[in-house]
Amino acid sequence: MDELNEQRQQRIKKLDHLRQAGVAPYGARFEVKDRAGLLIKLHGEKTKEVLEQEKIPCTIAGRVVALRRFGKAGFAVLQDGSDRLQVYLKKDLLSEQAYTVTEQLDLGDWIGVTGVLFRTKTNEFTVEVRQLTFLSKALRPLPEKWHGLTDVETRYRQRYVDLIANPEVHQIFATRSRIIAGIRAFLIERGFLEVETPMMHPIPGGAAAKPFVTHHNALGVDLYLRIAPELYLKRLIVGGFPRVFEINRNFRNEGISTIHNPEFTMLEFYVSYADYHDLIVLTEEMVSSLAQQILGKTVIEYQGKPITLTPPWRRWSYHQSIIEVNKLDPAVLGDRTQALAAARRLNVPVDSDASLFNIVNAIFEETVEPNLQQPTFITDYPIEISPLARRKDSDPSLTDRFELYIAGREIANAFSELNDPLDQRERFEGQAAQREAGDEEAHLVDEDFLRALEFGMPPTAGEGIGIDRLIMLFTDQASIRDVVLFPQLRPEK
């Protein structure tokens, strides 16, 4: 019998002993009146004498994460969320049944206790337990050296163990929740309506990505898990909602990396009568105010480097950034032969038969993106890589679009929306031709969306912000898997 099975069998024996003593090893309701963190905050600085005088009662519950026994007494540490508090278990202060429970305790068990706050001889803030309720028996031991668990495979695959072992992980996901709540409040305060759009689409659209395919038995059709909610949100603008947003789950059948998860969270919002310049200001305000609200500052540290989120942020055009970073002649970006030669000289991997705009975009992604550490709006993207954005009035080969980069990665994508249905049809058809040529990420022609545009969409600006990447930035995490509770992994062997 291996060690794990042996320990499990020992714990099952203790479970039987509890039942024989009349104790339910998997208890029912327990009224928690106090939280460990709040008790520490309110009373943790009080002296031994003050605590003895005030005799502060409390009732808490939690998981046993430390246990020391000696004679007819012992100490346990209860973990309550991300906070921990020591409890003192003494035979003279407990009922016979409650003391029986203490004898059957293991690390990982859940208990509820009622008692008074005091300080031990070593001055440790502690609950002197007068009543004890057993709540749940853990049949599996916590992993060896579980304090500060670092094994990545275990942390991601068994997030529940990670949350037990690493209280700071609790804080990351608590911060995640606060960020999403802050975004929601920010937008609602500015007149946005929160909406929900379909997660299964008859035609994938709104982004360049390979979708996941499923089948609807009742309808007898294949559907696609959404890669973006964009086209449905713009249908709502057509329908007369002037400001809408959705905090949504998207699915893209692509590679997995430190910044890519096939299932991810995105904020998308749309504003009638606005353009992308309005969204630049709104984005600066949203992100900087969130940093102040959540972190208490707008100059933060990410992976050892300071990031200044205080507005205004840099604006830099797409072509100009490539020219300045690589010291290129502007003519290079307009000539395929010269662009291909420049890519080779810069060690940028591109196919010899790649189109001009794909070569130029590869140079941008390889040489410019990694250098965008401070918040930077890259603007004026070519129309070939912006099939849903409005053409620039001053240069129809470019679009009214920006992407926001922070710490070398894209955080947001926004543009003045294309509301000309004939232009949109032409671009869809161009994308469809690319798809037929083998580009699995190119758009299909969405006839219903084109029909919606023909009913008339007002001038509109729209934006998508990657929530997971924003949370990585705010919590100083290098991998997206550290801000997703249950990231996608290969099946266990």
Image: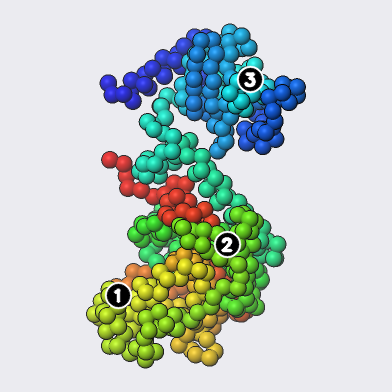
Three-letter amino acid code at the position of disc 3: Glu
Position of 232 compared to 273: left or right?
left
The residue wearing badge 3 is 128
Q: Nearer the viewer, residue 116 or 446?
A: 116
The residue wearing badge 1 is 348
Helix, strand or loop at label 2? It is strand
Q: Is residue 302 visible?
A: yes
Q: Which mark is residue 488?
A: none
**For the residues marked 3 and 1, what is the alpha-carbon distance in whole angstroms?**
66 Å
Q: Which mark is residue 299?
A: 2
Q: Measuring 37% from the left and 31% from the top, which residue is drawn there?
A: 144
Disc 1 residue crowd, few under 14, some 14–19, many 20+, Cα 10 Å: some
- The quarter of the displayed image where residue 303 is located: bottom left
Q: Nearer the viewer, mark 3 or mark 1?
A: 3
Three-letter amino acid code at the position of disc 2: Val
Relative to 155, is 14 above or below? above
